[in-house]
Amino acid sequence: MNDLTVLLYLVMFATIVGTTFAFMYTMMKSTLREVNSPRRKVHPEMEDVKTGDELLVFNLEEDDDDDDEGNITVVRR
């Protein structure tokens, strides 16, 4: 190996190492930004439902005698 080949190898190695660390930095930055940002999307049919509203629930169980057990109270945080 002559000096030109070694220099070319080192330049290419440094380029690959630099781009790898740049890629890792940008991906971690974007991942942390997504984790820290609130992104709770509400289903379109649930947009008008407020906290404390009772929802009607349908169960196929035949032994349910009490009417109040099927209601669910919505709590949004």
Image: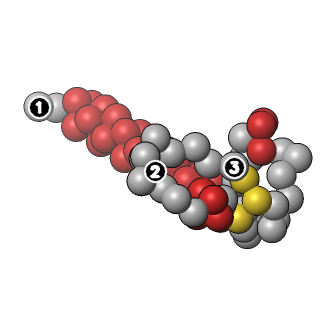
Mark with earlier residue (1, 3) = 1
Report whether 49 appears left or right of 39: right
**Residue type highlighted by circle 2:** Met
Compared with 15, 33 (above or below) is: below
* Mark 2 lies on residue: 24
* Mark 3 lies on residue: 56
Compared with 10, 35 (above or below) is: below
- Using the numbered discs, state the Cα–Cα distance from disc 2 to disc 1 in whole angstroms: 33 Å
Question: Which of 58 and 10 lies nearest the eye of the viewer?
Answer: 58
**What percent of the width, then of the height, locates residue 37?**
70, 60
Q: Residue at point 65% right, 64% down? A: 68
**What percent of the width, then of the height, locates residue 44?**
78, 36
Give the crowd class for mark 3: few <14, some 14-19, many >=20 residues within 10 Å: few
Task: Decide if residue 73 is in sight here.
Answer: yes
Report whether 72 appears left or right of 76: left
* Mark 1 lies on residue: 1
Q: Are marks 1 and 3 in contact (CB under 8 Å)?
A: no
Question: Which of 26 and 75 lies nearest the eye of the viewer?
Answer: 75
